[in-house]
Image: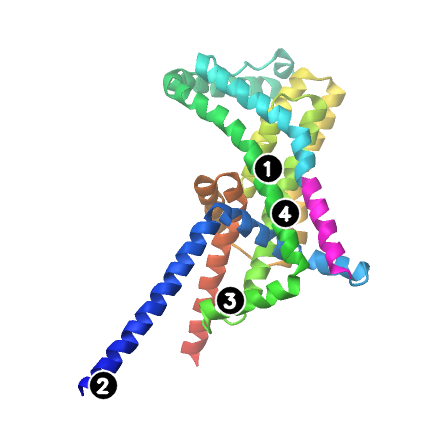
């Protein structure tokens, strides 16, 4: 009997040692990769969302999958570098001016111009609304200026972080390219990992996860980036100050599913007051096109994937941005959507079991 107890104790000790070793190994591994965790995660998301395009391009290139991955990486880098070249100077200058005005306590909103007031029928109303808004906002600014001044150094700190964010996106694209070069191996590995982690709770969850990632990246993030770039180009052409900052705000609003016209409409009014009638009308048409672009693209892109409630996208975007910064704005809605789809799949499976 004593011999049996000693054998059981020895087995328990061996199990404890193995579990402890595995736990230490996982914790140690996570500690090592933690600085690159979000970058790698975004790289995986990029690879999964661009995999169908990779397959089609591989067919066109007669099976040369490595060349296909390299071309997609080059396109991805261009999509990051070109907006940086276009908007970075504007973003840095605008943030610098905001920080200086906050520090000096001179942050103001200009009054509506006489050109706007002269618009037939609508001009007077626009002037009244603008005066009401800016008057209230000026009062608020005057009250909170002492508190806002402490954020001036933080805004300047954001400028220094912009370069780091760009480097993170470049690294993520390169990591995504590496996964695409080993697409089949990565797919099999993901399937096995999900099977170990989730088991039989949700069958083929890796396929659900892939469809969800593509849906969110193409139908939400992708459209937001397109809207921001097109809006930014229009603002640059007509000489809107701080075009880079406004473009980023347009992208943020589009990702969290708020209408970009919240930003674009006041800018259109500003352009009307500063430019000729012809330029102003062309810019307003351009702005309206940007505003309705999501209604045109969403049925084409979001419809290819799976339906995700906009509340999930909103919470994921805001939570991701607050937790991880700019890159979290993109990763957050994808991760929260995955969690949502897992819960939905689990509930549906339990309902099927109960009905049987």
Which label sits on residue 173?
Answer: 4
Per the image, label 2 sits on a secondary structure element best described as helix
- The residue that appears at 63% across and 41% down in the rendered structure is 225
Residue 246 at what x, y percent from top left? 59, 29
- The residue that appears at 69% across and 59% down in the rendered structure is 52
Q: Measured along the vertical axis of the image, is residue 142 above or below residue 231?
A: above
Q: Earlier in the sequence, mark 3 or mark 1?
A: 1
Q: Which residues are magenta?
A: 64-79
- Check disc 3 and report the residue beneath it: 193
Q: Earlier in the sequence, mark 4 or mark 2?
A: 2
- Check disc 2 and report the residue beneath it: 4
| Mark 1 nearby-residue class (10 Å; few <14, some 14–19, many ≥20) | some
On screen, residue 243 versus residue 25, left or right, reads: right
Residue 204 at what x, y percent from top left? 54, 70
Camera-nearest residue between 334 and 219? 334
Q: Earlier in the sequence, mark 1 or mark 4?
A: 1
Quote the CA–CA distance across marks 1 and 4: 11 Å
């Amino acid at each position: 009997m004593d011999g049996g107890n000693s054998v059981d104790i020895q087995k328990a000790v061996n199990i404890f040692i193995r579990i402890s070793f595995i736990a230490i190994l996982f914790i140690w591994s996570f500690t090592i990769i933690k600085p690159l965790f979000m970058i790698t995660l975004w790289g995986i998301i990029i690879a999964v969302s661009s995999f169908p395009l990779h397959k089609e391009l591989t067919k066109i290139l007669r099976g040369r999958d490595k060349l296909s991955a390299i071309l997609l990486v080059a396109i991805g880098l261009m999509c990051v570098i070109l907006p940086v070249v276009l908007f970075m100077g504007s973003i840095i200058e605008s943030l610098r001016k905001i920080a200086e005005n906050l520090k000096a306590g001179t942050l103001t909103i200009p009054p509506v111009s006489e050109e706007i007031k002269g618009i037939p029928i609508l001009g007077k109303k626009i002037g009244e609304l603008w005066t009401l808004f800016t008057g209230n906002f000026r009062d608020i600014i005057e009250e909170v200026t002492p508190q806002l001044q402490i954020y001036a150094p933080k805004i300047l700190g954001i400028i220094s972080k912009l370069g780091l964010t760009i480097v993170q996106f470049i690294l993520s694209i390169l990591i995504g390219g590496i996964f695409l070069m080993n697409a089949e191996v990565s797919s099999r590995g993901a399937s096995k990992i999900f099977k170990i982690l989730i088991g039989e709770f949700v069958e083929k969850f890796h396929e659900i996860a892939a469809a969800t990632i593509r849906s969110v990246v193409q139908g939400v993030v992708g459209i937001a980036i397109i809207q921001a770039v097109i809006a930014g180009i229009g603002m640059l052409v007509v000489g809107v100050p701080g075009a880079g900052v406004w473009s980023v705000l347009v992208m943020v609003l589009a990702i969290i599913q708020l209408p970009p016209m919240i930003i674009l409409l006041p800018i259109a009014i500003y352009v009307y007051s500063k430019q000729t009638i012809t330029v102003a009308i062309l810019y307003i048409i351009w702005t309206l096109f940007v505003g309705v672009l999501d209604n045109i693209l969403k049925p084409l892109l979001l419809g290819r994937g799976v339906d995700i409630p906009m509340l999930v996208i909103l919470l994921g975007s805001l939570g991701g941005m607050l937790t991880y910064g700019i890159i979290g704005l993109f990763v957050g809605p994808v991760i929260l959507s995955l969690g949502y789809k897992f819960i939905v799949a689990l509930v549906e499976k339990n309902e099927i079991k109960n009905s049987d």
